[in-house]
Amino acid sequence: MQSHELLREVFEKKAAKEISADLDLSTSMVYKWSQPAAKEGGIDNPLDRIEALIQSTGDQRIVQWICQRAGGFFILNPKNAPHPAFLIPATNQIVQEFADLLAVIATAAADNKITSPEAEQIRARWEELKSATEGFVVACESGDFNSLSTLGRKDAKAQS
């Protein structure tokens, strides 16, 4: 789905006129966001600009920030998927990631309080666990386990 198509659907639920008032923008500009930029008088909409910013910077924190603001989280899809021979190492990696998260939590909570830097460290470990687990689940769903072999080798190298 193109960004302008999504915005067109969004405008069916909340009128562009209301959105323009909320954002203090002209209604015509908001309407143009729902048109293809190359024709029909459309312009690059905020979704296109965010995508361009992410591509330019290569920084996934932008997506993570947006997801957090929307009450969710971002999990990067794996680029490849793995082979059954690496299923056990991949499973072990997820267990290890979870153990690492628990260790960070236990260390942070040892004094019966969690500081802001400790909370940030817990969040970082949690994000790593979610990404590792999502990669594993996608590989399981697709039946292609080639990417898990990469994870298993990476972990083996890191532990040696």
Image (tube, rainbow, N blue to C red):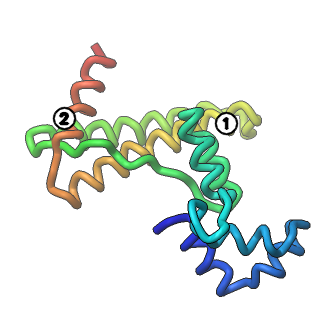
- Specify whether residue 123 is in view: no
User: Earlier along the polypeptide chain: callout 2 or callout 1?
Assistant: 1
Residue 88, compared with residue 156, is above or below; it is below
- Specify whether residue 7 is in view: yes
Q: Is 12 positioned to the left or the right of 58 in the image?
A: right
* Furthest residue toward left: 85
Q: Secondary structure at mark 1?
A: helix
Residue that carries the numbered disc 2 in the rendered image: 149
Q: Is 48 positioned to the left or the right of 69 in the image?
A: left
Camera-near label (2 vs 1) is 2
Count of marks placed on residues: 2
Q: Is 57 positioned to the left or the right of 133 in the image?
A: right
Tell which of 154 and 142 is nearer to you. 142
Are there few (<14), some (14-19), or many (20+) residues within 10 Å of tag 1?
Answer: few
Q: Secondary structure at mark 2?
A: helix
Residue 47 in which image quadrant: bottom right
Q: Is 116 positioned to the left or the right of 37 in the image?
A: right
Residue 19: image x %, image y %? 80, 75
Tell which of 139 and 52 is nearer to you. 52
Residue 113: image x %, image y %? 75, 39
Residue 54: image x %, image y %? 58, 41
Residue that carries the numbered disc 1 in the rendered image: 120
Point 29% across, 26% down: residue: 155
Residue 71 in which image quadrant: bottom right
Point 28% across, 25% down: residue: 154
